[in-house]
Amino acid sequence: MISKILSTAVKLWLRSQVETAEELEIEIASDNSQILRGYLPYVSLASNYAVYQGLHLNRVRLKGSNIRINLSQVLKGKALKLLEPVPIKGNLMIKEADLKASLSSPLLWSGLTDLLCQILVANEIDNPRQKLSYSSLNWEEISLKEEKIIIAGTIQDNRSQKMEKINIYSGLTLANSHTLEFFPLQIEGLPDLSTLKIDRLSMDLGSEVVIEQLNLEQGKLICVGGLTIMP
């Protein structure tokens, strides 16, 4: 009975974290004594399509371990909450169509804008964020090729209304378990960057992220690794 209540609570909690989760499957490995202490040694989930904060994910397979929850409150009908950080491991696949559908996501927009700002800084362009604040930046297209990612957008000066196209071409590999490396890097469309001084850029994703494998293939990106979810 407790396992059934808990499984339902976990599903409700997961669905509260995502906008969409299709064909969601959950497995909880725990005996009754552990459950009664609010301790779950192992939880796995699988979904063939999910949307998280506007990010479209085609296939998600995740496993969490050593999870502690507020069981006493769950049994009273309260929402499930994590009491401690949870290490998550798994893999996901993102198709090119998923990235295109995610372009309006604040997470992806912010990530692409951070990449552009880092390119500008690396090439000695001062105060890129301030300069971008005077413009309207719109990311319009992402293409995944064999070992290459292509990002296209436009930037319009809010004062002169002059519009420039931006095209970023780059390979994508791992510098280490939490750092992406963009190389060789090429950008077109910005007069200030007609010639790049630096054609290699690293982007640190933070110590809470651990990527073991990153494969960029024609039309899809496959990632294997883990992260820590904070309460």
Image: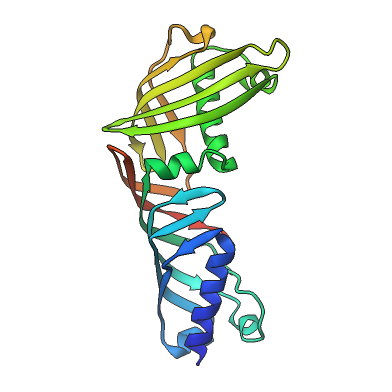
Instruction: Note whether 10 is above or below 165 in the view shown.
Output: below
The residue positioned 51% from the left and 30% from the top of the image is: 140
Please state if 45 lies on the left or on the right of 35 as rendered: left
Q: Residue 85: in sight, yes or no?
A: yes
- The residue most toward the bottom is 1
Query: Percent from the top left, x then y, of residue 110?
Result: 57, 36
Query: Percent from the top left, x then y, of residue 47?
Result: 40, 63
The residue positioned 69% from the left and 23% from the top of the image is: 133
Q: Residue 220 or 35: which is nearer the viewer?
A: 220
- The residue most toward the right is 159
Instruction: Note whether 224 is above or below 195 in the view shown.
Output: below
Instruction: Note whether 155 is above or below 48 in the view shown.
Output: above
Instruction: Note whether 20 is above or below 93 in the view shown.
Output: below
Q: Residue 43 or 217: which is nearer the viewer?
A: 217
Q: Quadrant of residue 136?
A: top right
Q: Residue 205: in sight, yes or no?
A: no
Please state if 42 lies on the left or on the right of 138 as rendered: left
Query: Percent from the top left, x then y, of residue 118?
Result: 52, 24
Q: In which quarter of the image is residue 200?
A: top left
Q: Which colour scheme is used?
A: rainbow
Q: Quadrant of residue 217?
A: top left
How many marks can you see? 0
Name the quarter where the C terminus is drawn. Answer: bottom right
The residue positioned 57% from the left and 61% from the top of the image is: 17
Query: Percent from the top left, x then y, of residue 57?
Result: 43, 51
